[in-house]
Amino acid sequence: DAGVIQSPRHEVTEMGQEVTLRCKPISGHNSLFWYRQTMMRGLELLIYFNNNVPIDDSGMPEDRFSAKMPNASFSTLKIQPSEPRDSAVYFCASSLGTGGGGNTEAFFGQGTRLTVV
Amino acid sequence: GNSVTQMEGPVTLSEEAFLTINCTYTATGYPSLFWYVQYPGEGLQLLLKATKADDKGSNKGFEATYRKETTSFHLEKGSVQVSDSAVYFCALLSGNTGKLIFGQGTTLQVKP
C-alpha cells in the first residue's frame, strides 16, 4: 500500500479564498484523523472519523473549517474563507480501529503545508 | 479530559549520551500509548507503542515502559546518534473514544 496520501503537498493562497485539502487513507482503515501543526500550538487534533462518520469535531477552530468523508477512501478538509492565521501544516492520519487496547497505531501522510497571504 | 504532557525542549546532547524524554498522561479507562518521531519536512512515524500497563515498547534502541501507577511513558535510549535528531511526540489513544491525542513534542538535537 502507498500509505496515507495527501494533496496538495504545498498550497499558497490569498486571504479570503477557499482552500480544500485532500486525504486518501490506507485501504481497510476505518478511522481517519485531521491534525494541524504550528510552532505555537504544536499538533492539534481537529476532527476524526470512524467508519466515515465524524465522531469528535471539538478541535475544529471555527465555522470556517469543515471536513467530510463521503466514502472510506477519501476525506476533505475545507477552509472558507481562509485567513493568514490558518497557515500551518495539516496532517491526515488513518488507523485500523478505535482503540479498546488494540494495536491501532495511526499512519500519517506527508502533510499539506498551507500558506495564506 | 484526556491529555499528554511532555518535557520542554529542545534537548541537546552529545553523540553517545543517554537520552530521557519524559511523558505523563491523564486518561480514563485503559489507553494505548505511543511515541512518534518526526524528521524535518516529513510526517510522523511510529517509533514504539505499548497497549497495557507494564508493557515495554522498543525499537531502534529506544524504549519506553507503560507505568500506570505513575501515569508515565518516558522515552529512553542508551546512546544517541546524530541521526536521532528529530521531534519526538508522545501520544495516547483512548480505548473509550478512539481519540488519538499528542503531547506538544520535544525537539532532540544530537551534536557530533
Image (cartoon, coloured by chain):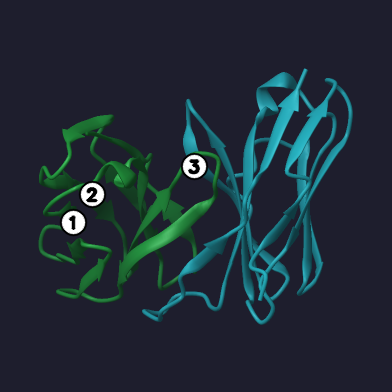
- Tell me if I can see residue B97 in this picture: no
> Can the viewer see residue B74?
yes
Q: Colour of chain B?
A: green
Whether A102 is drawn above or below A31: the answer is below
Output the letter for the chain in cyan.
A
- Which residue is disc 3 drawn over? A43
Distance between the Cα atoms at labels 1 and 3?
A: 20 Å
Residue on which disc 1 sits: B72
Please report the residue visible at 10 percent of the width from the left and 46 percent of the height from the top: B18
Q: Secondary structure at mark 2?
A: strand
The vertical placement of A48 against B82, above or below, is below
Say which of A48 and B51 sits in front. Answer: B51
The residue under the point 41% across, 79% down is: A103
Q: Is residue A69 left or right of residue A2?
A: right
Chain ID at mark 1: B
Q: What is the three-letter code of the residue carrying label 2?
A: Cys
Helix, strand, or loop for circle 1?
A: loop
Earlier sequence position, callout 2 versus callout 1: 2
Q: Which residue position is annotated with label 2?
A: B23
How far is disc 3 from disc 2 in space, using C-alphas? 15 Å
Left or right, A25 with respect to B102, comes to: right
Q: Residue at x 76, y 74 (%)?
A: A72
Query: Is disc 2 surrounded by few (<14), some (14 to 19) or many (20+) residues within 10 Å?
Result: many
Q: Nearer the viewer, residue B65 or A10?
A: A10
Question: Percent x, y for residue A16?
Answer: 87, 23
| Place of residue B54 in the rendered image (x, y in percent of width and height, measured from the top left) | 14, 74
Label pair 2/1, CB-CB below 8 angstroms: yes
Percent from the top left, x then y, of residue A57?
63, 52
